[in-house]
Amino acid sequence: MLELSVNKFRANLKDFVDKAIKDHQVIRINRRSGKDFVVLSAEDWEREQESLYVLRNTSIMNQVAESLVTYQKNSGYKPTPEQLDAINSI
C-alpha cells in the first residue's frame, strides 16, 4: 500500500488516480488533522465487496469447506476422459 500526505495527493491527483486504476495500487492518504482515507479503483472495490459477500455467506463457506475435505481425501468427482474432452472443447 502506497502512503502519502494529502498535500502530495492533491498536487498529483491525476497521477495517483491513474496508478490506482491501472496498477491496482491502493493508496492511503494521511491527514494531519483528521482520519486517513484510502483510494482504490472501482473495480478493486467491487472485487473486495464480492469477496466479503462470499466470506459472510455461511452456505457458500460450508460448500468450500466440504470441497476441501473431498479434495484432501481425493474422493471428489472424477470426469471420464470423454467428459474432459467435452469440457475442454467449450
Image (spheres, rainbow, N blue to C red):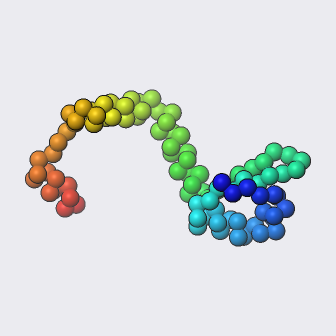
The quadrant holding residue 14 is bottom right
- Residue 63 in view (yes/no): no
Q: In which quarter of the image is the C terminus?
A: bottom left
Q: Which residue is drawn at 57% across and 55% down?
A: 44
Residue 18 coordinates in the image, percent (x, y): 65, 68
| Residue at the farthest right position | 33
Q: Quadrant of the N terminus?
A: bottom right
Q: Mark yes or no: residue 34 visible.
A: yes
Q: Nearer the viewer, residue 3 or 9?
A: 3
Q: Decide: is 39 above or below 53.
A: below
> In the visual, does 32 lie left or right of 86?
right
73 or 53: nearer the viewer:
73
Report the residue at 81% width, 64% height from top.
8
**In x, y percent, where is residue 20?**
64, 62
- Please tell me which residue lies in front, 28 or 63: 28
Nearest the eye: 87 or 26:
26
Image coordinates for residue 39, horizontal then vertical, percent: 69, 55
